[in-house]
């Protein structure tokens, strides 16, 4: 699988350009008679139809972020480095190997290799597949082969992008007392953001950790004008024990001491990604935790487990590679992780879970 990972790394597949990677996966499964393989755009779906009582879906994205001097794979001993090696061509390699090996699994299997995970969700290959044939994504549970260092990472946190616009009143800076400086009003607002209480709820034994960060600020009229407007963008990561609306309401309440409607202040939810509950009590996900032989932990970032959770399919993250190496120039994945993830998944699909 280390060599297979290297072959995948050497296929350029930056988001929106996954055609060659999808073709490679389809060819790799060409002689797997136990699978029905369908290609939709730059997405590949392979499924067994054995009439089992449960179906497990295993998904992985084919795209990468743009290269950073790491276009080509390098195998050095027990490691394969290169663009996407950890995020997540190592996971893609495991999926290919498992799909070929699992000829008589005890659960029906769906393997989904999809495009455009690293860009805006509206481009996601999962949405493209769902639009063409929703049934291809039907399952009792799902595993995202995202890099997790071969540890089950449960659910995921949600994300809110919130725009806060503070108003003021213009004046000449020589007579600043005649105006209200909107930028100066950011001081108290940023103090509230900086003092945000980072909730750390534990769900299914996994501790999540919320955060609130100011990520962009825009304002100013001219060098001699007191500004009458400033716009601040906040990024909020919220735990899966809250809905999107509850998380947004909590941030609005936090900021309320500064918000003055008389000055035209506004707090708007610009974009969001839903959180996903851990659901580790589902038999297939519980079997995965047992097979991994490691204590599960919370997924603090966002992944497409949210996509499946929103559709009533419990999902978890489990794949080779260190998630902290994702999108870095020195990204790599090791043989140990590849073999451990494959062995754990084989154990799950060969059991009576």
Image: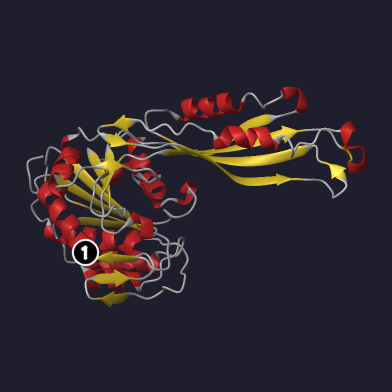
Q: Is residue 214 left or right of residue 225?
A: left
Residue 27 sits in quarter:
bottom left
Does residue 278 appear in the picture of this structure? no
Q: Is residue 24 above or below residue 43?
A: below
Which of 199/307 is in front?
Answer: 199
Q: Label 1 neighbourhood size at 10 Å, few (<14), some (14-19), many (20+)?
A: some
Q: Eyeballing the image, is 275 above or below 15? A: above
- Can residue 91 be seen at all in this image of the molecule? yes
Residue 320, placed above or below residue 169: below
Q: Secondary structure at mark 1?
A: loop
Residue 102 position within the rendered picture, expressed as x and y whole percent measured from the top left: 12, 56
- Which sits in the foreground, 153 or 316? 153
Image quarter where the C terminus lies is top left
Q: Quadrant of the N terminus?
A: bottom left
Instruction: State which quadrant residue 70 falls in.
Output: bottom left
Q: Which residue is mark 1?
A: 29
**Image side of residue 57 versus residue 240, left or right:** left
Q: Give how far across and how far down residue 104 sits, in percent.
A: 8, 52
Question: For this view, does 231 lie left or right of residue 244?
Answer: right
Residue at x-position 29% and y-position 73%: 7
x 56%, y 27%: residue: 254
């Amino acid at each position: 699988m280390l060599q297979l990972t290297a072959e995948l790394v050497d296929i350029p597949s930056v988001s929106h350009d996954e055609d060659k990677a999808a073709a490679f996966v389809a060819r790799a499964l060409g002689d797997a008679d136990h699978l029905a393989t369908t290609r939709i755009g730059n997405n590949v779906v392979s499924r067994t139809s054995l009439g089992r009582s449960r179906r497990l879906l295993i998904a992985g994205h084919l795209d990468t972020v743009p290269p950073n001097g790491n276009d080509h794979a390098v195998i050095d001993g027990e490691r394969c480095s290169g663009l996407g090696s950890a995020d997540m061509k190592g996971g893609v390699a495991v999926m290919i190997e498992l799909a070929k090996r699992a000829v008589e699994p005890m659960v029906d299997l769906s393997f989904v290799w999809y495009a455009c995970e690293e860009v805006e969700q509206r481009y996601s290959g999962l949405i493209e597949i769902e639009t063409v044939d929703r049934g291809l994504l039907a399952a009792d549970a799902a595993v995202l082969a995202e890099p997790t260092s071969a540890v089950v990472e449960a659910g995921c946190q949600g994300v809110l992008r919130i725009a806060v616009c503070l108003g003021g009143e213009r004046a000449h800076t020589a007579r600043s007392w005649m105006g209200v400086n909107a930028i100066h009003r950011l001081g108290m607002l940023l103090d509230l953001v900086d003092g945000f209480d980072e909730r750390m709820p534990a769900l299914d034994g996994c501790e999540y950790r919320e955060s609130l960060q100011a990520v962009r600020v825009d304002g100013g009229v001219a060098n001699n004008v007191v500004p009458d407007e400033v716009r601040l963008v906040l990024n909020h990561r919220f735990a899966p024990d809250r809905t999107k609306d509850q998380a947004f309401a909590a941030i609005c309440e936090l900021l309320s001491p500064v918000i003055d409607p008389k000055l035209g202040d506004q707090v708007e939810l610009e974009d969001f990604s839903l959180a996903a509950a851990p659901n580790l009590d589902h038999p297939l996900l519980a079997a995965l935790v047992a097979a991994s032989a490691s204590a599960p932990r919370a997924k603090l970032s966002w992944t497409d487990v949210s996509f499946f959770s929103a559709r009533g399919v419990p999902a978890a993250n489990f794949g080779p590679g260190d998630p902290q190496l994702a999108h870095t120039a020195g990204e790599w994945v090791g043989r140990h992780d590849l073999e451990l993830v494959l062995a754990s998944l084989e154990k799950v699909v060969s059991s009576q879970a």
